[in-house]
Amino acid sequence: MLRAVMMAAMTTHPDWVIQRSRAAAEEIMNAARSSSYEVAAEWLALTREAHLKADRLVEWSVWLAELIQKHARKYKLKPLLEKLKVDPRS
């Protein structure tokens, strides 16, 4: 249900969506709950979308690069993070 609310708020309140989805993903990643990394990636996809809606691609790219570096040894998580990169040419 929270995801539906976030999708509805994406265009009007992207900062709120970024804050909530980022916190949900970080909780999973920082706790090293590898069985839930796919869920974290889903939260991060919402975070990315909100950044794009708010025209904050640079901020997203920098933060994602930091996440990839921070969690580089989590071999199940790293490829999920890599998939969330955004090509600035598109």
Image: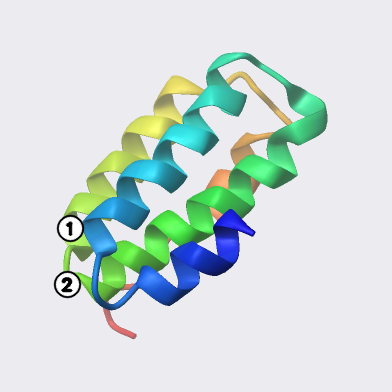
Q: Which residue is mark 1?
A: 58
Q: Residue furthest top?
A: 31
Q: Which mark is residue 21?
A: none
**Which of the two discs, 1 and 2, sits closer to the camera?**
2
Rendered position, 3 above or below 68: below
Q: Residue at x 41, y 32 (%)?
A: 67
Q: Which secondary structure, mark 1?
A: helix
Q: Residue at x 60, y 36 (%)?
A: 78
Q: Check contact, mark 1 vs mark 2: CB within 8 A.
A: no
Along the viewing direction, whichever of 56 and 62 lies nearer the viewer: 56
Near mark 2 (Cα within 10 A), the count class, few <14, some 14-19 or many ≥20, is few
Q: Amino acid at mark 1?
A: Val
Q: Position of residue 48 (x, y in %)?
A: 39, 60
Q: Position of residue 87 (x, y in %)?
A: 36, 72
Along the viewing direction, whichever of 66 and 11 lies nearer the viewer: 11
Q: Residue at x 22, y 64 (%)?
A: 57
Q: Which mark is residue 55?
A: 2
Q: Quadrant of the C terminus?
A: bottom left
Q: Residue 85's image quarter?
A: bottom left
Q: Position of residue 1 (x, y in %)?
A: 64, 59
Rendered position, 53 above or below 57: below
Q: Which secondary structure, mark 2?
A: loop
Rendered position, 71 above or below 36: above
Q: Amino acid at mark 2?
A: Asp
Answer with left or right where residue 36 lies relative to residue 84.
Answer: right
Answer with left or right where residue 1 lies relative to residue 68.
Answer: right
Asked if residue 11 can be seen in this view, the reply is yes
Rendered position, 33 above or below 37: above
Q: Residue at x 17, y 63 (%)?
A: 56
